[in-house]
Image (cartoon, helix red, strand yellow):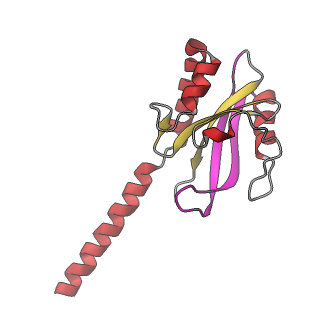
Amino acid sequence: MHTLRRLFCAALLTLAAGAAFAQEQGSREEARALVEKALAHIKSAGMETAFTEFSTPGSKPWHDRDLYLFAYDFSGKNVAHGANPKLRNTSLIDLKTADGKFLIREMIEMAKTKGEGWIDYTWPHPQTKELEKKSAYVKRIPGYDGFVGCGVYFKK
C-alpha cells in the first residue's frame, strides 16, 4: 500500500512540475500582444526610451516569464534586447541559428516585405540549454527602418 501511495504522489509531483513549466512559457498570442504593446509604447515614449526599457532585465511589462522583446534596425544592428542588454548596438546581421538560418536577415526580410510575420527556427532554451523549436513574431516599427519582435518556444 505504501508503494502505491508513493507512486501516486510521485505522479502528482511530476504532473505539477510539468504544469508549472508550461505556465512559465508564453504563448504565440501573448508574444504578438507584447509586440503590439511595444509599438504603442515606442509611439508614446519615443524610441530611445522604449528601447532602454525593453533592454532592462525584469522590467514590467516588457518581460513576462520567458517572453522578452528585441529590436533591430535594417542593417542588422541590435537596438534593444530584453534577454541580453549587452547586445545593444552590436551588429548581428550574420547570426546563424543551430539549423543554419541567418536569423536576423530573415527577420529583416519579413519586416521589410510583409511588415510583420512569424519566423520559425531552432535555438538553445535558456533554462535547459537544449536546442528547441522556437518562433518569433516580428513587426516593422512605423517611421523607422527596423522592427521589434518577441519569440516563444514551442510547447512540449
As drawn, which residue projects farthest toward the left?
A: 1
Figure quadrant of residue 138: top right
Picture layout, residue 42 above or below residue 3: above
Picture layout, residue 130 above or below residue 52: below
Asked whether 69 or 3 is in front, the reply is 69
On the image, the x and y values in percent for residue 22 come to 43, 54
- Most common secondary structure along the magenta stretch: strand
Quarter containing the N terminus: bottom left
Report the magenta residues as a range: 114-142
On the image, the x and y values in percent for residue 6 come to 23, 80
Picture layout, residue 3 above or below residue 148: below
On the image, the x and y values in percent for residue 4 come to 22, 83
Asked whether 50 or 100 is in front, the reply is 50
On the image, the x and y values in percent for residue 71 come to 67, 32
As drawn, which residue projects farthest toward the top?
A: 44
User: Magenta segment: does it hold 133?
Assistant: yes
Q: How many marks?
A: 0
Residue at horizontal 54%, vertical 27%? 53
Residue at horizontal 64%, vertical 46%? 135
Q: Is residue 86 left or right of residue 24?
A: right
Figure quadrant of residue 38: top right
Q: Is residue 12 left or right of residue 121?
A: left
User: Magenta segment: does it hold 81?
Assistant: no
